[in-house]
Amino acid sequence: MIVHYTDGEHLDNYRSPLTEGEIKMDENATVMEFIEMWLETFKKNSVKTASYERLETSKKTLANYEIASKRIGEVNFFDIQRYVNQLVEDGYSMSGIKKQMRIVTSPLKLAAAMRIIPADPSIGVKLPNETRVKKQTKEVIAYTNDEQERLFKRVAVSPMNVGYFGILLMIETGLRCGELLALKWKDVQLDRSRVHVHATILNPMSNVKAVYQDSPKTKSSNRIVPLTPKAKAILKRLMEDRQTEWVFESKGQRYSYKQLMYQTKKLCRESGVPYYGEHVFRHTFATNCYYKGIDVKILSRLMGHSSVSVTYNTYINLYGDGFDEMYAALCL
């Protein structure tokens, strides 16, 4: 198949039906068939591996719904709206609904642009009101100062443990687990008290499929993170036992996510603090930054978020809705 257009372009010169293998991509192709073509032809080589796998996951979920088997030439606004409403009834979160909606609407927009169907049937489809979504956004949990102190004290009296040091470094830097495990010594600049975050580990939970990707989760994730005195002390101790290019290693191999998770549970158990998963250390870093008076714009850069709104919406429990500030200003 030869197609010289990319997803989202206006295909003004397109005239003939698109064929992929034995499947004729015209108005009689099912939604699922067209999505599979869209993924293979337009997405596989244009998005990062992790993004492509998320699209594949959305496609598999879509297969459970009636709209997947409908012909693209027959799909209308009401079919898509009913699909969205079904996702609400099935208890999907707002972010989950948006992802599942995009796996249908993006390919259909392309089909309309390619004139395979007369118009984009997704125009006008409404997302549900937040109050109607059953699966509400999870509360952001962070460790208290007392719990953090217990974690640090336990590490201080424990034998050298690479996993324990990784846990503390996440608290001090806010790195994601994948970013932490992808750190190489060339990324660390102790003399300048900073570390360059530019890579991540894809599929970190798999010992077989885990892949080092020399590009971060998003463009904003490529960042410089300052090192606190505690963070520098951790890295200096790790450097003493340096054997490979990896900052976090075990027996000459890069430290795995499963090893880190095991050590996290062990450290929490020994410290007498609850285990909330590995992402709690990133939330703890953000909470510490807030109480140190760091502005949300600076925090957004430190966290590597795509926008300040992402940071604000994630940590709105910290920054609030501004009511107290507005009240104080009005009462002056």
Image (tube, rainbow, N blue to C red):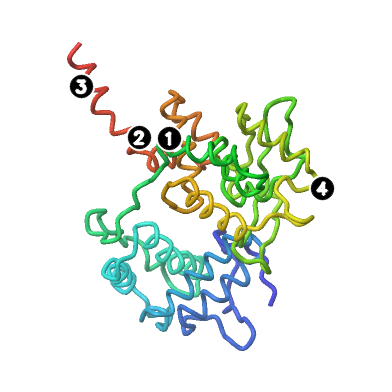
Kindly give the residue lying farthest to the top in the view shown: 332
Labels 4, 3: front one: 4
Residue at 59% over, 39% down: 157
Residue annotated with mark 4? 243
Measuring 51% from the left and 66% from the top, which residue is drawn there? 110
- Which of the pair 295/282 is nearer the observer? 282
User: Which mark, residue 287?
Assistant: 1
Please state if 34 lies on the left or on the right of 328 as rendered.
right
Circle 4: residue type: Gln
Return the x and y of residue 45 as percentages of the image width and height.
Answer: 67, 64
Labelled disc at residue 327 = 3
Label disc, if present, on residue 152 of the rendered structure: none
Q: Is mark 4 on a helix, strand or loop?
A: loop
Cβ–Cβ under 8 Å for marks 1 and 2: yes
Q: Which amino acid does label 3 sit on?
A: Tyr
x then y, percent, for residue 183: 70, 45
Left-right relation of 329 to 17: left
- Compared with residue 268, is residue 19 higher up or lower down, i.e. above or below? below
Q: Which of marks 2 and 4 is nearer the N terminus?
A: 4
Depth check, mark 2 against mark 3: the one in front is 2
Measured Cα–Cα span from mark 2 to mark 3: 18 Å
Q: What element carries label 2?
A: helix
- Residue matched to label 2: 318
- Going from N to C along the chain, the mark reached first, 1 or 2, is 1
**Circle 1 sits in a helix, a strand or a loop, which is it?**
helix
